[in-house]
Image: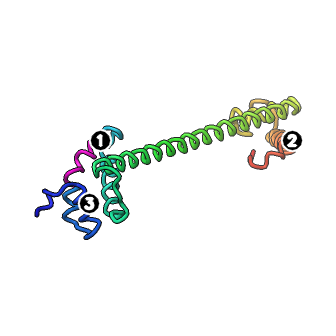
Amino acid sequence: MRKNSYNDEELLEQIQLHRDAAAFTTLYERYWERLLTLAYIRLQSSADAQEVVQEVFLDIWKRAGNISLEHSFHTYISAALKYKILTLLAKRKAEQARSSLLVQDEADASTEQWLSYQQLRQELEQTVQTLPEKCRLVFRLSREKGMSEKQIARTLNISIKTVEAHISKALKTLRTSLQHLHSFFLW
């Protein structure tokens, strides 16, 4: 008797009793295209649909000895496909949730860094405002305008040694004032 003439339940019995590969192949050929179509409609992914259908058939082969049908094989394989699809969708949803949390954590860290930076700038500006006027001017020309000591000396008509002294005083004041910020290297 040819395997194609067996009904689904008889084929499953052949697989259960004899690990009959020909019976398995016949079941596979009867159902794979239908299952693949159903899986694709639900998952909208050819690769995912193929994976889910392969898993269903792999489970049937592995668990054949433990399968007991309450209804028809068709009902069994349809339910197996449904559960594989639901499992995959739940996995996708969990991955999206984890990904979303990761993006949120990155955004929170970014906001925290921005706020820390803003706080540092504010504290820096407050400290610079406490410097004597000439020292503050030299410091701003050096750090904010990017002028060299020689250019500052020429612009303000003072000696280079005076410029160096003002910059040293400003940096010392800033380091003392902001020493609680160990992670930033000011200069």
> How many residues crowd around disc 1 within 10 Å: few (fewer than 14), some, or many (20 or more)?
some
**What is the magenta range?**
28-37
Give the numbered dot on residue 38. Answer: 1
Q: Residues within 10 Å of mark 2 (few under 14, many from 20)?
A: some
Please give the name of the residue rendered at 85% of the width and 44% of the height, measured from the top-left corner: 172
Question: In the figure, is residue 62 to the left or right of 105?
Answer: left
Dot label at residue 177: 2
**Mark before the other along the chain sequence, 3 or 2:** 3
Q: CA distance from mark 1 to mark 2?
A: 69 Å
Q: Position of residue 36 (x, y in %)?
A: 27, 46
Residue 45 spot, x, y in % from top left:
33, 42
Q: Quadrant where the N terminus lies? A: bottom left
Looking at numbered disc 3 in the image, what kind of residue is underneath it?
Leu
Mark 3 burial class by Cα count in 10 Å: few <14, some 14-19, many 20+ = many
Q: State the SS at label 3.
A: helix
Figure quadrant of residue 16: bottom left
Q: Earlier along the polypeptide chain: callout 1 or callout 3?
A: 3
For the stretch drawn in magenta, the main secondary structure is: helix
**Location of residue 156 with respect to 49 vertically, above or below:** above
Residue that numbered label 3 is attached to: 12
> How far apart are the alpha carbons under marks 1 and 3?
22 Å
